[in-house]
Image (spheres, grey):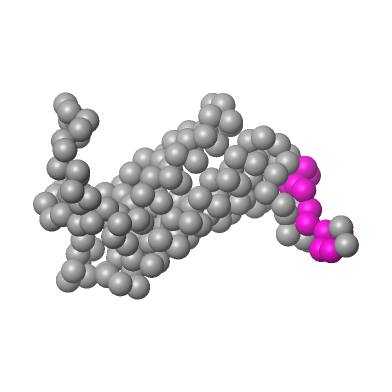
Amino acid sequence: MVKLNKIYTRTGDDGTTGLVDGSRVAKASLRIEAIGKVDEANSAIGVAAAAVAGGDLAAALYRIQNDLFDLGADLATPAPDGDFTPSEMVLRIVDSQAQWLEQAIDAFNEHLEPLTSFVLPGGSEAAARAHVARASVRAAERAVTALAAAEPVNPAALAYINRLSDYLFVLARVLNDNGASDVKWVPGANR
């Protein structure tokens, strides 16, 4: 259980921040950039959840927000040796979290017409907010993969963040009357 009695500590006033293992890194590091982008994506998902306003879809988005906190903890716990085994002391994203997203995507797709065009990020307000969250997740994915190019990153974390943007795309279609209200891209329409 996390207990926060004091919000400010002043320890980051020198431009560094602490990781789970007690080490300190620059706030401008690739690791902190990735954690920050995951936090931004989590906030965008919170806005999408508010637009959905309750029910199973909002509950699913809250579940994802919790998973993104797990992802942030995973990224905040370096594993220079490449050992990403979860334990009581080390929280890691696990394969089942991405698998849950895949199952949800498959269930959504059963009710959607196949795409015949790219769709513009819009439609209903809830769908538009899901698209904003998807774009934010893509930015987080770019930051996490940039970190992975420089340091070891949990492969399950990479799979999760990749699958999450797919989930949000399909969710946006669901929120657009199962794709009936998707705004289709018309190439060169305004020439």
For the point 78% across and 53% down, the residue is: 184
Residue 55 showing in the rendered view: no
Q: Is residue 186 left or right of residue 41?
A: right
**What residue lies at 19% left-to-right and 64% top-to-bottom?**
79
Residue 102 x %, y %: 51, 55
Q: Is residue 188 magenta?
A: yes
Provide the residue span drawn in magenta: 178-189
Kindly give the residue lying farthest to the left in the view shown: 22
Residue extending furthest toward the front = 14
The quadrant of the image that shows the C terminus is bottom right
Is residue 59 shown to the viewer in this render?
Answer: yes
Q: Position of residue 181 (x, y in %)?
A: 77, 42
Residue at the (40%, 61%) spot, across then down: 143
Image-based side of 169 in relation to 102, left or right: right
**Number of dots carrying numbers:** 0
Most common secondary structure along the magenta stretch: loop
> Percent x, y for residue 75?
28, 56
* Left or right: residue 11 compared with residue 166: left
For the point 36% across and 56% down, the residue is 34
Determine which quarter of the picture holds residue 23.
bottom left
Query: Is residue 33 inside the magenta stretch?
Result: no
Answer above or below: position of 142 versus 15.
Answer: below
- Which image quadrant: the N terminus? top left
Please determine whether, in this image, residue 158 is positioned above or below residue 111: below
Place of residue 107 in the rendered image (x, y in percent of width and height, measured from the top left): 59, 49
Q: In front here: 122 or 158?
A: 122
Viewer-proximal residue, 149 or 124?
Answer: 149
